[in-house]
Every structure is written in structure tokens, then in C-alpha cells.
Image: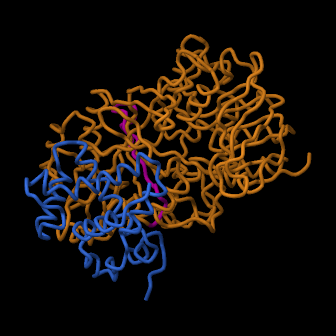
Amino acid sequence: MSAGAFVDGGKSGLPVEEADFVIVGSGAGGGAAARVLAASGARVVVLEEGPHMRAAELGVSEAASRNRLFRNQGKQAAFGRATTPFLQGRCVGGTTFVNSAIVWRLPDKVLDRWHAEFGLADGLPRAALERAAARIEEELSVRPVVEGETAGTSDLLLRDAAKKVGIEGRFIHRYDKGCRGSGRCLHGCPHEAKQSTAVTSLRRAVADGGFVVAGARVERLERRGGRVTAVRGFFAGDGPERGQRFRVAARRAVIVAGGCVQSSNLLWRSGVRAPHLGRHFMAHPGTAIMGLYPDRVDAWTGASQGYEVFGLRDTLGVKFETINVPPEVTAARLPGAGARFAKRLEELPHVANWAVALKADAEGRVRPSLLFGDYVRYDLTRGDLERLRRGIRTVAEMHFAAGAREVITGVSGLPETIRSPDELPLFDNAPLDPRAYSLVMTHLFGGCRAGRDASTSVVDPTLKVHGVDALYVMDASVFPTNTGVNPQHSIMSIATVAAERLA
Amino acid sequence: MTLAPFERRWAATIARALVPPGALAGAGIDLGQIDVGARYAEECAVSPWYAALAFRASLWLTWLAPLWMLGRLRTFTGVDGETRVVILERLLKHERYVLRMAALFLKLAICGMLLGDLPTLAQLGAYRLRKSA
């Protein structure tokens, strides 16, 4: 096999016009599938809409990173009673390039349900998933954040708080090789220490003869009879080829791994009309609760996310994590304007942000839209809001347990801040209205859910689209339920198992 | 979407009311030198149309707030500094969700423009960046 390459499609067009496998998307699913298929000797082309950013090109400001590395410049949202922003990477590496690289295997209970309710035992057997997960952990150098090395003060405070209130937690396990604790995981790692697919599986695929084409947006899939034979799109990156259209033929299959919103919409634009396509969109909405501490926290040093508290995951459906929200974003959530706000800004180094991530029961819907490109409809249930409220109260309680002198509630209808645990009961009466909270969604699932029954699912247990030959979906859109844990590892594991079957 | 020169001036005026130029001076940061108007226009230019529209709408809402919020035949520049701050505070806590979100969107954008610079982030002690002398 001749050597492959990373190619900038906007500058130099396509390196080949035909491949055994064409993979749409270079994130967790696309990267894992590319690695397996290229290693098997197949010719693989990965098409990524976003740019290929090298470490030296990365900026430090939140706005610069958002505008270059995130889909729609980080300005996309789900609509419902509230408008809830959600973030997706749009660059080589996809979201793995801009997340905190948190590792969780798919929980046993979740897989049990996928097997029992959705008939996925043959396609995604437990033993194969565990084997894939173990191999990925080894290849991507999984290790926990370490006190004295990559843990920040905020992480140590949350650890102490978890012990005091008696909820189980741990230092976060991450894909990390040589982290220097620069706190910029969410901007793209400046040292390539974070083991995103851009620096791991995609490089392996290229070494095995694969091509990764950046700046190549796939618009639709070409079908002949009942089989997908090619993809069509245009070059979105800068350069002389920008705007030019392309076609890549797939000899064996097309694998769609564009993320939850994009994968189902690509299928829809290509004429797939499964009854449940675009349905069962799920997420982990979350919000950060700020604690103000007497001493400096300097939350922007250390791993971007270093400690997690998961003892309430199976009961309340919430997980708490430290998160180094960029200073300029943290600043915007400090209360006030004018001189009062200026005084608050001086306290920035004393802020610790702890996130509440909710395993929401809500299910939304995804559709292409002439106005927005992608349209997502999503509304939390009353039960979700009740659990979110209890989660926020618990995090506030933990801030006080760790020594915070003040907690910023971040809930409309409640006082801006509380200064004592005696005020915690205020949260019990917080509005059960999503508009009262500043929520952001990061982990997205569904839209092309997997299942044995073609009338209630989009892909079969092998992740092949029901009724369409040579078309597979390998990303979190196939998850039939919400997992309750950070999804990257699960996505890579299922994509590995599904790709091994094709190899 | 392109902002008109007068809209750029509005953005700069609102930014000065939200974050007084002397804020963070104690940390060796000079926020007064940042051209918020130009950055606001730049953000509108690179954003999807709906986000750019939200940027522009939040600007107009705030600019005309003395009229619709206080019932005074004035714009944002036509009221004194203290009233400007009162307007921003009331918008940020407004009971109408869409108005509260518009104000938060504006605040988020302005904070990003003022605090997202490499020297500012370094002076704040972010990301292990080296501070200037």
C-alpha cells in the first residue's frame, strides 16, 4: 500500500477519487473506524468539513478557538421553551480535538438495556466491546489526573468536598500523553498531549495508506439501486479549490460519522426515510456553578477537567465535574454591570467552576432546515428539571463544604449569590422552567438509533442503515439510549467493533 | 453581516458602561485600549447569520432601552453613566427570557472581547501563560 496523507481539500483538492471505504467525519467514530479499516489493508478516505489545525496554529482566546474549531463558530442551539447552546467540534479530530478527553467505558447497565430492549447483542457483543475499549485505552494512553502534576486547585477542592459530603468521586481518567496542565484542552491542546483522533488513530490510518481530507463538506450520498456508491460535496476550506464540488466513489461502503445532528441530516438529505430518523435526540445538558473562595483558585491551570463526582449517577442521574471555563466566559457569568461588575472581576482568580451534567430523559428531534442548516428541537422534562435542581443544590453544598465564602446561583428567580449553607433550601423552590437556567449541551446522542426492528430504528445491530446496502453510521447518533457518561470512549469502542466486522 | 460605524460606536459605549475601563487595573490590565466596536463588527462578520442578527438585536435593544424600559425619549448615550448601569443590570435580570438572554449574549461577547487577549489572559494568570514585566 502506498503512503497516505493529510490533505487540505481547499488548497489541493482530492488525492483520490475512489476508495474502499469513504468515512464522513474525523471525530471519535470516524477516527476509530479509519484506524481499523486502514490497518486491514483497505484504502480509506476520511472527509472532514473543518480545518486541520496544527498545535502551533492554536490560539488562546475562547472566541478565536470557537470561531475556528467549532461547528457554526460555537453558535448553534437547540430550540424549545429555552434556547440551549450545544457544542460540536468541526476540525480534524472532531470533538475529540476540543473536549477534555474524559474516559468512561459504556456502563454495564446501559449495555444490558441495549441488548435486551434493542436487540444489539449480536452486533455489539460485550466481550468485543470490552476488548476494543481495552485496546483503545492502551493506544491512547489513558491515565488519571495526578495530584502535584496535572491536578489544579479546583480539582483538589472538589475532591475534598466529595469526601466531606460522602459522595464517590475520582480524579478524571483521560487520553493523555505528557500533559503539562496548561488548561487549554477546550481550545485544542497546544502540546499535542491530549490524545485526540487527530494525533492518534488518524495518524495511524495515514501511516497505513489512508487519506484524511480537511475542508471537505459532504452534502449527500449517491445511491444506485439499494446501495450507496459514492459521496458528493464541496470544498469548504480556504484555497483555490474552495467551493469546487467533488465526488468520491466507495467500492465497499460509506461510513457516516458526522456527529448526532449532522449524520441524521446527511441521511435525510440523501433520501433515507426511516420513520425514526432524526428522532430520539438526547443529551447531557449541564451548567456550571461558581464558588468564590477566600484564596486564589487559579482555575485555568491544570487539566481542563480534573475531578469528577459520580456517586449520584445511578440514583439522581447527575455527575459533577470540575471545569476550567475560560476566564472571559466565567467573567460574563459574574453578576452585575459597571463598578459592581468591575469589583467582581477582581475575584476571577478565586472562582471554581463545577459542572452539573444531567442524564436527561428528554428526547428531541433533528431535521435539516433551510434557515439554520440544522434544526434541533429539545425540551427538558419536568423530572429532568427536578433532578437538575437537586444537582445544583448539591454542588452548591459541596462548594460550601470545600470552604467557599459565596456561591453564585446562576438561576433566574433566586438571589444572585448565597453566602451560607443555611440558604441552600432556596434551591428547592427554584423554578421548574428551563429558561431559569444557563444550560449548555455537550454530549449528544441519537437521531439514527440502532435496533433490530427497522420500524423503530435507523441502523441495524451491525450499524448498517436498515434497507440500504453499503451504508453505515458509526457515531453517537446510533446510541439508542442516553449513557450517563462521557461518550467518546463508547463511540470509539462501538465504531471499532463495527469496523472490525467490515475489515 | 456588516455593522454600521454608528453601531460600532454603540458597542464601544455599552462596553464602557458594562466594564469600566479602569477595571482590573490592579492586575496590570488596561482594558481601555481595546477597540470593542471593531471586534464586535468582526464577530458579526464571521458568525452565522442568525448569531450575527442576535448580536445586532442585542445592541439595538440596549441602545433603545431608555425609551422602552424607562419611558424616556432618550437613547443609551442620552442618559447619564449611572442610569446606563441601571439599564444593564435590569436587562441582565429581566423577567422576560428573551431580553435576559439578549443582555447575557451581549455581556458574553463584550467580556470575550475585553478579556480574551493573550496579554490579558497572561496577566490574569490563565493557562500558565507568561506575564509581562
Q: Colour of chain A?
A: orange
Instruction: Answer yes or no: is residue A32 visible.
Output: yes
Q: Is residue B64 left or right of residue A324?
A: left
Q: Residue A373, how many percent across, how many down?
A: 51, 37
Quarter of the C terminus of chain A within the rendering? top right
Residues shaded magenta: A301-319
**Residue B123 occupies which quadrant of the picture?**
bottom left
Q: Residue A35, how many percent across, how many down?
A: 75, 43
Q: Is residue A94 above or below residue A362?
A: below
Query: Magenta span has A314?
Result: yes
Q: Residue farthest to the right?
A: A1
Q: Residue farthest to the bottom?
A: B133
Q: How many marks?
A: 0
Q: Is residue A126 above or below residue B59?
A: above
Q: Is residue A174 left or right of residue A223?
A: left
**Residue A341 occupies which quadrant of the picture?**
bottom left
The chain assigned the colour blue in the figure is B
Q: Is residue B44 or residue A15 the one in the foreground?
A: B44
Q: Residue B45, how many percent across, how many down?
A: 46, 58
Q: Is residue A240 or residue A361 the one in the foreground?
A: A240
